[in-house]
Amino acid sequence: MKQEAGRPCPPAKQPRRRIPKDPTPRFKAPDREALALAERLVPREHLARRVWRVVERFELTQVEARSSALGQNGFAPRQLLGLWLYASLIGLHQGTRLARALQTDCALRWLSGGHCISVAVLNRFRAQNGALFLAALEETVRWAVQEGLVRTRELGIDSVRLRAHASRSQVRVRTQSLRRLKHLRAVDVDALDACQRAQHARQVRKHQEAVHLCEQRAQASVVLSNPRAALMQFPGNGVHPGHRLTVVASGVTQRLVVGVLLTASGNDKGHLEGAMQQTRRVLHAAGVPLPLRLQVAGDSGYWSEEDLRFAALHHACMDVLLNPGPATGPLATKPGMLPREAFELQHARRAVVCPAGRTMHGPVLNHFDRCEVYFGQGCPTCPLRPQCSQAERRTFTVRWEYEGLLEAMQTRMKQPDAKARYLQRMATVEPVFASLQQDMGFRRLSSRHPPTIDAEVFLKLLAHNVSRLLTRSRLFCVFVLLEAPASPPASQPG
């Protein structure tokens, strides 16, 4: 049938879209038969039930809103969060082991609503919800602040090394690559055959890329298969790729995590600022007023120029207590020689007086070590020369800004209240690492992807805070039972 002239063409039909009558996300209904069996087998005060009571308090509206109300119903995010928290507390850190345990463990089956959840669903939920775990961790801090459990004057900072999911064959060290490039440049390429020249070119390209990556990331080593890891020395277990987890904990008895920083650094230098700035943000969001002065104690790993400068600049809002560490590099003292304390540093004149009372020549700027070098005078005839220097004259290096920061921290640590407070540092933050590594058995991450790495670390710290809140509630119940008034004695018959 032809279209009549002068009449407009009818509009094209738009494809129909399925619009739900109720946009509320829908999740799988519980398996009534399996859930009823698990309900009878799980005791009333079981750890899974107590974890679930905490999980019910979390705000998961935004996460649940991402679920669809159309098509096949998925698993509720609250159930998956409860599963991962309980699994972390009992030492299940891999999705395969958790999925296998769901088939036989009644407590896990009770948390999942009677369902056997697949490995893909468990791993996908953990990988995609790192922000949820971090927000839940900050929410536990808010609950602790409301209950008066956070001690802002009892903060401790330290770090722990966690094994990375990476192979040693994927590690590139800058110093080794530079040494190898030097040897490769000394090879006569013209004397090689075609196969050997191709292999030589591959080796040069490999080490040049390693040096470029180390300089780009400002690290001494890189891991090609895991950008968040670096080569680290593990106590009693050799050198392996790892992550450095810096934690700020609060209270000697509570030991709640209030700040976290995950890096690929081989030491603690320079991490004080990042960890404490995040701690201030978390505490302020939890209800602690910002003008309140915090007090944090750290070990000798944070005795660096960057950390001491941060402590001096933020002295008004943060009281930092750091333990002095041994001098390293150009500031170190050789064994058997006079210590640095024997030399007098005159900050006003920027001069150095040696133990013999003579003003040293200088300074000469050392650009590589960013310090000033002073030279002794009259050293060949000085009676203190055998104890002062093995060379013809003594050299002395000074970082004036570092020396001023060092004296300020040493003066603060000599005060009686600082010594008593610093002795509580180990009891504040070290039990957090014992909880992660000994109680939960969490020593190695199970993924090499950056979002999953962050999510896994935040999940374990969230499990630690939940366990501390559960311990607090149990102790509170025991205290109430012990302090309950006794019933009046029965009246004696007249």
Image: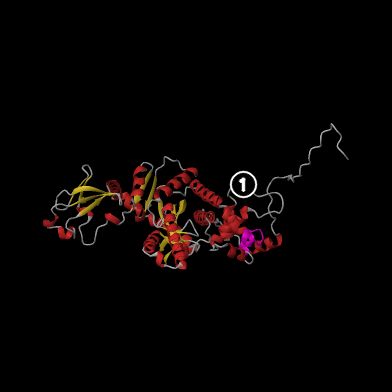
Of 351 and 1, the residue lying toward us? 1
Residue 347 lies in what quarter of the image? top left
Q: What element does badge 1 sit on?
A: helix
Identified at 64% across, 64% down, the residue is 41
Question: Coloring scheme of the render?
Answer: secondary structure
Identified at 31% across, 56% down, the residue is 325
**From this viewpoint, which residue is outermost toward the right?**
1
Look at the image and give the residue range highlighted in magenta.
Answer: 105-120
Using residue 107 as the reference point, say whether residue 378 is left or right of it.
Answer: left
Check residue 115 for magenta coloring. Answer: yes
Residue 377 point in image, percent of width and height: 15, 52
Residue 366 point in image, percent of width and height: 27, 50
- Per the image, the residue denoted by label 1 is 61
**From this viewpoint, which residue is outermost toward the front?**
190
Residue 201, visible in the rendered structure: yes
Of 424 and 92, the residue lying toward us? 92
**From this viewpoint, which residue is outermost toward the top?**
6
Quadrant (top left, top right, bottom left, bottom right) of the N terminus: top right
The kind of residue tagged 1 is Thr
Quadrant (top left, top right, bottom left, bottom right) of the C terminus: bottom right
Residue 20 point in image, percent of width and height: 73, 45
